[in-house]
Amino acid sequence: MTLAASLWAHLFLTQMPDTMGDVGMYAAWAASIEGFGIEGAYFPAFAQRFPIDYPPVFPYLLGFLSWLRGLVDASPLGPASALEFWIPLPAALADLATAFLVYVSVKRIASWRAAYLSMLLYAFNPAVLFATAYWGVMDALNIFFALLALVFLDQRKPELAWLAITLGVFTKPFAAVIALLIAAITLGRYGWARTLRCGIVSLGVSALVLAPLLFTHPPVEAIHRVLFDFGNMPFVTSNAHNLWWSLTGGVPWVSVYSPAIGTLSYQTVGMLVFFPFWALVCAASFMNRDRVALYLLAALACFGFFMLSTHMHENHLFTALPLLAIVAVTSRPLAFVYAGASLTLLANMLLHDPYLVTEFLYDLRYDPRQLMRFTFAPGGNISATHLWWTHANALLNLALFGGLAFLTLRRWRAQPSHKAALST
């Protein structure tokens, strides 16, 4: 009943205007797939206005939805609804499945009442509904696969965990942040032989996902096209309220290739900041034997990816939310982190929604009460009010990230030796 009510809320919000244009772009991808096939959509013989820049799992779903809509349209049930109605359905269902996984995970560390409350709060989390239903972004799909992989790992099924996380990476490459943690945990718990077997499973799934492209293009070219196509928005921060938003003064669309420190670009500095942090989290995961710390380390990795990496968007903190929802039941400080991250994620998206901000708060381009002039920013004018709100949100994110890092370290240091048996 709870998940059905959440689905109704999702479907209601999907009827709102597509203010960010994502659903319209996905519809263009679906039309391209329907007309030219998946291979033609990825490697078009002509210039497309919206070339596919996602890995294949979601485009496969788009092709299936387009085919299913045509089937309904030709049946006695037709005519079918517009494709824009069908496109948000996979992500909405993924949100519900993630909420159920939150319930399953929490039930292993707390009472069923706590598990049900965690599921309820996630299923109706305003930030989740805003991102998936109102904006129509597809992050819920790779979030579901990433959490499913961690649940399988917690249940001592590493092969299934690697299968799930591979699908997550081929839905959106950001799942790779969790993938390396899963590799480290598998190696630490099961040794090289079991890890090698899991790697074979992952390679098999990868081959199946890439098969339509591998038949017509060299493997290196196909893999680079579907996993490493980050050139469409090469900015230090694409409106993400993270460390780089604060360091660049909140001026949008700063190129990642521009110098940050001497001759080092922002992209290089971002990698020098994030990768050591990521390596430390993976090392801690390798020695981890605590069930709560499993989700806590994953949440820290996702939060750190959002805070420390370049190229981040407004909604990319979303990946950490279900993980924080799981660990929130273990302590009041972690519950505050979960609530705070939900608030800052919602604020990050709201403060960059062109319709809602202009209609209810202020004009993003011109605020006659308070105006700052940046000659190097697009349009030249940035609202000072907008800058103050966004900087406050970025500082809150930094505080939450620091608090999460401290709580994770304290939990990890308190766990039994890495030589101890895994708790039941």
Image (tube, rainbow, N blue to C red):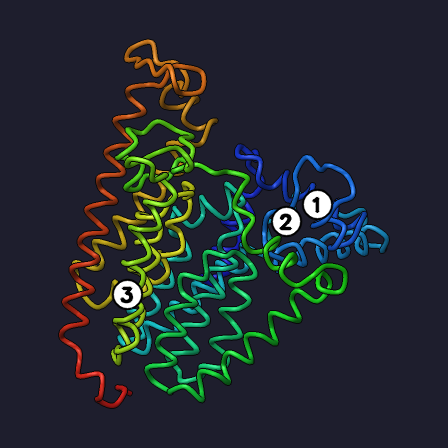
Residue, x 51% and y 78% (percent of image)?
199
Sequence-wise, the earlier of marks 2 and 3 is 2
Q: Residues within 10 Å of mark 3 (few under 14, many from 20)?
A: many
- Which of these two is toward me, 380 or 97? 380
Residues tagged 1 and 2 counted as in contact (Cβ below 8 A): yes
- Which of these two is toward me, 132 or 142? 142
- Determine the CA span between mark 2 and mark 3: 36 Å
Residue, x 50% and y 41% (percent of image)?
134
What is the x, y in percent for residue 270? 34, 46
- Number of numbered markers: 3
Asked if residue 142 lies left or right of residue 248, the reply is right
Which amino acid, by three-letter code, is at mark 2? Answer: Ile
- Determine the CA span between mark 1 and mark 3: 42 Å
Which amino acid, by three-letter code, is at mark 1? Answer: Leu
**Quarter holding the C terminus?**
bottom left
Can residue 45 be seen at all in this image of the molecule?
Answer: yes
Give the residue pinned by disc 2. 87
Give the residue pinned by disc 3. 281
Can residue 347 be seen at all in this image of the molecule?
Answer: no
Query: SS for tag 3?
Result: helix
Q: Residues within 10 Å of mark 1 (few under 14, many from 20)?
A: many
Query: SS for tag 2?
Result: loop
Query: SS for tag 1?
Result: helix
Residue 394 lies, with reference to residue 99, above or below; the image says: above
Q: Residues within 10 Å of mark 2 (few under 14, many from 20)?
A: many
Looking at the image, the residue that sits furthest to the front is: 263
Give the residue pinned by disc 1. 83
Asked if residue 191 lies left or right of residue 328, the reply is right
Name which quarter of the figure residue 385 lies in.
top left
- Determine the CA span between mark 1 and mark 2: 6 Å
Residue 137 lies, with reference to residue 203, above or below; the image says: above
